[in-house]
Amino acid sequence: MSDPQDYAITVENLVKSYDGVKNAVDGLSFQVKSGEIYGLLGRNGAGKSTTIKVLTTLMHPSSGSASICGLDLRRKANHIRRMIGVVQQEESFDFTTVERNFSIYGMLWEVPRSIAEKRTEELMELFNLKELRKKRSFELSGGQKKRLQVAREFVHDMKVLFLDEPTSGMDPIMRREVLDFFREKAKEGLSILFTTQILEEADRLCDRIGIMDAGRLVAEGTASELKNRFGSMKKLVLTVSDEIADGAASNVREIVSRANGIEHLTIDGRNIIVLGNNVSRSLPSILSGLSSIQLEIDQINLESPSLDDVFYEVVAK
């Protein structure tokens, strides 16, 4: 039998209701191993942020149980707060400067001043904040604010880090650097619960992924396992010679809708992207239909499902 200390987070049949009628989190159960990055995915309203607020002791659960590093969430909330870090979607301390944000965090966590100052300089360098150090937080762009939110959390030591869409607003280069930083911290033993709307991030970063829908966990596994499990679905990408005009787009939708096993269609510039089961069998009829409206096909690709495709298959149908 596994030792509870082997798990950074254990959630069992967790329920949270705001009104006593509808459950925002509805019987949720999962575990995060020590040193693991666990991605919690789901569309808006799935219950991800509520789950993080409960697990970080900001809200009381309606029922069920949860523990952080073996400590019961209800009975040991004060102990838990001292061993976790949290990056929420909401902003805080926006009235003061970037530099002062780090100082406040150092004081809140009782980090020795010399250590806090050293870490502040290292983190401002790493997160490209040095030139912004005298700016007040409310003057920053959305991406800059998010960089500050993430960076200041690492002024103090922690065992478990909760990240609620931590890269929103960041440019692609900074997003990749931040994700690499999280990965290095996990290698050092930090356990991370990570929510994101950017599925490519979860595919790249997370050791395991749980997909939520309506407050429940509807699928779980590594990115590869999830892709294989829902691998009957394929993506067909047809590239035509010219950009598809609005009038032709309606004809394309009608042609594809007549094919069997098609779940979703996207028209993007010159690309017709078809998602579904047995799409290869539908290919001849689709090609014939496109030919009848004088669309010339330049390229045909049949691809394995991505994590985005798995997400659509699980929750978006």
Image (cartoon, rainbow, N blue to C red):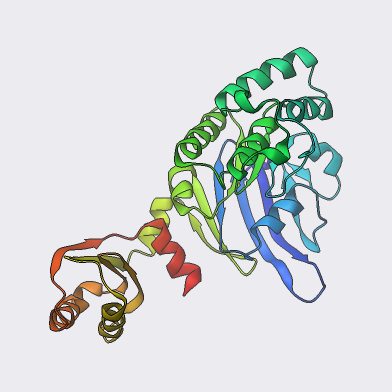
Q: Is residue 306 left or right of residue 179?
A: left
Residue at image point 67% right, 29% down: 154
- Residue 45 lies, in percent from the top left, at 64, 66
Write down the quadrant of residue 269 in the picture.
bottom left
Residue at screen point 56% across, 25% down = 126
Question: Is residue 186 something that shows in the picture?
Answer: yes
Image quarter (top left, top right, bottom left or bottom right) of the N terminus: top right
Placement of 82 over or under 261, stated as above or below = above
Count of marks overlaid on the render: 0
Tell whether 136 sits left or right of 316.
right
* Residue 313 vs residue 288, the one in the foreground: 288
Q: Is residue 33 visible?
A: no
- Residue 222 position, x and y percent, is 45, 50
Residue 79 vertical placement versus 268 (above, below): above
Q: Can you give x and y, in whole percent of width and height, for residue 207 in the image? A: 49, 44
Q: Nearer the viewer, residue 262 or 39?
A: 262
For the point 83% across and 56% down, the residue is: 60
Q: Is residue 254 above or below residue 124?
A: below
Residue 29's x, y, as percent? Answer: 64, 59
Nearest to the observer: residue 215 or residue 241: 241
